[in-house]
Image: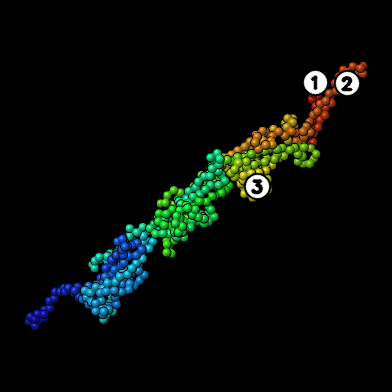
Amino acid sequence: MFKEGGAVNIQSNDLQIDLTHCQSAIALVKRGAFPLLPDAEPRCDALLFVFTVTNQGTEPLEDIVITDPLLGGAVQGPQSGDDNNSNTLDPNEAWIYQIQYDITQADKVKGEIENQATVTATIENTNLVIQDFSDDNSIFEDDPTVIDISHCPPSSIALIKNGAYLLLPDAEPRCDALLYVFTVTNQGPEPLEDIVITDPLLGGVVPGPQSGDDNNSNTLDPNEAWIYQIQYDITQADINLGEIVNQATVTATIENTNIEIEDLSDDDSIFEDEPTIMDVSSCQNPSIGLIKEGTVIDVDADGCMDSILYTFTVTNTGDVDLVDITVEDPLFGGAIPGPVDGTDIGNDGILSVGETWAYEAVYAITQTDIDNQSVINQATVTAVSFANIPVSDQSDNDSLLEDDPTRTPVPDDACTDGPNIGLIKEGVLVDTNADGCLDSIRYTFTVTNTGGSDLDAISLTDFILFGN
């Protein structure tokens, strides 16, 4: 303050004062150390975390709490550093906390343990709380602590499922059964127990092993391989599809723990999880047969045979189920509706192996058929297997093994559905003048209405008799 002539002149400049040396501060360093095995190799079941808490300020700190989520919360301690047992962290004092951590299977799978802790404290005789995030080696940083455990491979189990064809005496693969071989190996460092293979194709748990547990310990030791074998009965559904696609699962427990591990089977590798595929297409021999039979019938019960009832018998003569069954007959202009109710067993639209379906169709006799004295015809059946293999057969009159057309005799007195007429001409030698010498032929013309309608304006023409 300066005073001139009774006036007061006040001047001021900003003044900066460094008070950082007066700040309260706390620091936390978290390190990891491996306990050693007798051979000086680091253990893979546990490690030791060491926490160092220091007071970097000028005032004592109390209520020191280290919280570490990896260790389940608050860390107990300190084990050393509070030299005067004051429960107060004095300036430049360092408290040491130590706690063992059990390495988990998840840690081993990841190959490292990454984590960060927090320390909190209260400035003595105040309610002011300060804190710090841990660092791995410096009081001035807040980096997480990363422990490399790549030398500790995780416990691992592997399952390979192979299929083997059983052979007939002629070395052809059997179509009724095959053999599955399961190989289970311990790919980790620790023994495994409670080994269970589950395969839904085989109805659940696979019994065994048949070999591999050399010391009969019921424990799958590292690098040990157990072999399971089981026969599988091939089903009609398998043959229909032409292949068997399946995958099994193996589970185990790490010895003396409750930690369970598992693996899906692969067909040839311990590093993959692909299903095992067995080709049974060689067992597919789709075949179909058709028999067509005709019977002359009287549809309208008027006493005159007027139609032919055709019965089509379709049989699955192969060893795979068939679908999309179609019977076609040019006599009827295309596909025959069907099958007849009750002939499709299960009404499932599937012509199973050995199953027979029946189709029926009525054909109206024509004058041409009467003139020809028979109807000769052949139908065709087509189908496909579930593997989209097409099959077909031309009809036979009485055999599934032949392809002869069906011949149905038509009687002379058969009727037709529409207007129709029939003429029979008979001739007899006669002696017209009774002189004892046959000198003429007497013709008898029999005209019959063979149709379904009345007729009039009947006209009979015979050129040998000079016209009408």
Asked if one can make out residue 235 in the rendered structure from this viewpoint, the answer is yes
350 to the left or right of 87: right
Q: Residue at x 81, y 24 (%)?
A: 468
Instruction: Determine which residue is flagged by label 3.
Output: 344
Side of 212 relative to 9 (left or right): right
Q: Nearer the viewer, mark 1 or mark 3?
A: 3
- Residue 298 versus residue 378: which sits nearer the camera? 378
The picture quadrant where one finds residue 172 is: top right
Q: SS class of the residue under badge 3? A: loop
Q: Amino acid at mark 2?
A: Val
x, y percentage for residue 366?
Answer: 73, 34
Q: Earlier in the sequence, mark 2 or mark 3?
A: 3
| Residue 234's disc number | none
| The furthest residue to the left | 5
Residue that carries the numbered disc 2 in the rendered image: 430
User: In terms of image quadrants, where is residue 92?
Assistant: bottom left
Q: How many residues crowd around disc 1 within 10 Å: few (fewer than 14), some, or many (20 or more)?
A: few
**Badge 1 is on which residue?**
464
Circles 1 and 3: CB distance less than 8 Å? no
Query: What residue is rendered at 79% in x and 33% in y?
Result: 413
Image location (x, y in percent) of residue 2: 9, 80
- For the residues labelled 2 and 3, the Cα–Cα distance comes to 66 Å
Element on which disc 2 rests: strand
Measure how far apart labels 1 and 3 are at the Cα level.
61 Å
| Whole-number angstrom distance, CA of label 2 to CA of label 1 | 17 Å
Could you tell me which residue is drawn at 56 percent across and 40 percent down? 169
Q: Where in the figure is residue 337, as x and y percent of width and height?
A: 65, 43
Task: Give whichever of 289, 442 is nearer the camera.
Answer: 289
| Quadrant position of the N terminus in the picture | bottom left
Sequence-earlier tag: 1 or 3: 3
Q: Amino acid at mark 3?
A: Asp
Tell me: residue 439, above or below residue 325. above
